Amino acid sequence: EPEVTQTPSHQVTQMGQEVILRCVPISNHLYFYWYRQILGQKVEFLVSFYNNEISEKSEIFDDQFSVERPDGSNFTLKIRSTKLEDSAMYFCASSEKNRNTEAFFGQGTRLTVV
Amino acid sequence: GQQVMQIPQYQHVQEGEDFTTYCNSSTTLSNIQWYKQRPGGHPVFLIQLVKSGEVKKQKRLTFQFGEAKKNSSLHITATQTTDVGTYFCAPSGKLIFGQGTTLQVKP
């Protein structure tokens, strides 16, 4: 069964460092999403991406965040200068269309900022 | 934008009891999706509801979409310990989740 894969599964970084979280969406999917989940809290929407551009973003997704689809298969989330409060589980998801189809989630990357 | 509110935030039930979570929107929704996240896991799609008044069943789970397409519910009959997790609703398209209802089941 096709799946969304995320790497690494766990990333530890020092405050102020840049991190890149990687995702490989399902190959025929066109819509991509990033979410974060702080421990014990709800799943928060960060950004959606379609046709090589951002289609929606939340207030959380400020100038410190960026997304890219560099090579037609990977979908990355970059955090330029990490803060302690960026520590969370980050989920990537993809869907074939943006309506009337389910989204498939990756297993997540746990980011720990120290 | 389309935001949904879920109640209750937490629910503890004895195994065998029923459970219901509600998802409410201030605006009319085109359709709605439900996801389940097991503890330590990632969200997994359960179902999508599209039509006004639609009712869909998956074994012990019953999903409803309100007539006005502003609310939805998930009802679990005779809960089991495998039902433990957080249940999220989200309008299709934007996929911005509600805050979820976390279900704990006491054996």
Image (spheres, coloured by chain):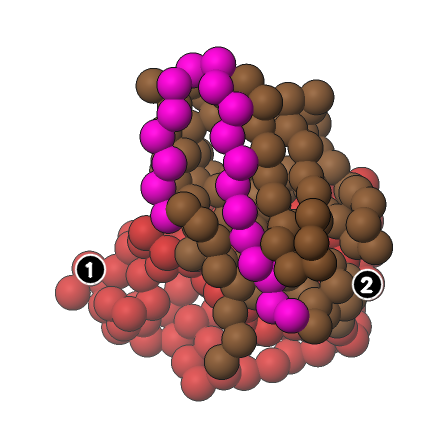
Chain colours: A brown, B red
Packing grade of label 2 (10 A; few <14, some 14-19, many >=20) is some
Q: Secondary structure at mark 1?
A: strand
User: Viewed as shown, does residue A32 lie left or right of A87?
Assistant: right
Q: What residue appears at the point 48 percent right and 14 percent down from the top-left corner?
A: A16
Q: Which residue is mark 2?
A: B30
Magenta includes B93?
Answer: no
Residue found farthest to the top: A16
State whether residue A105 is above or below residue A41: below
Residue found farthest to the left: B107
Q: Which mark is residue A97?
A: none
Q: Which residue is mark 1?
A: B106
State whether residue A43 is above or below residue B92: above
Split into 4 quadrants, where in the image is the C terminus of chain B?
bottom left
| Amino acid type of the residue tagged 1 in the rendering | Lys
Split into 4 quadrants, where in the image is the N terminus of chain B?
top right
Q: What residue appears at the point 70 percent right and 77 percent down from the top-left corner?
A: B54
State whether residue A97 is above or below residue B21: below
Residue stretch rendered in magenta on the structure: A9-27
Q: What residue appears at the point 32 percent right and 52 percent down from the top-left corner?
A: B40
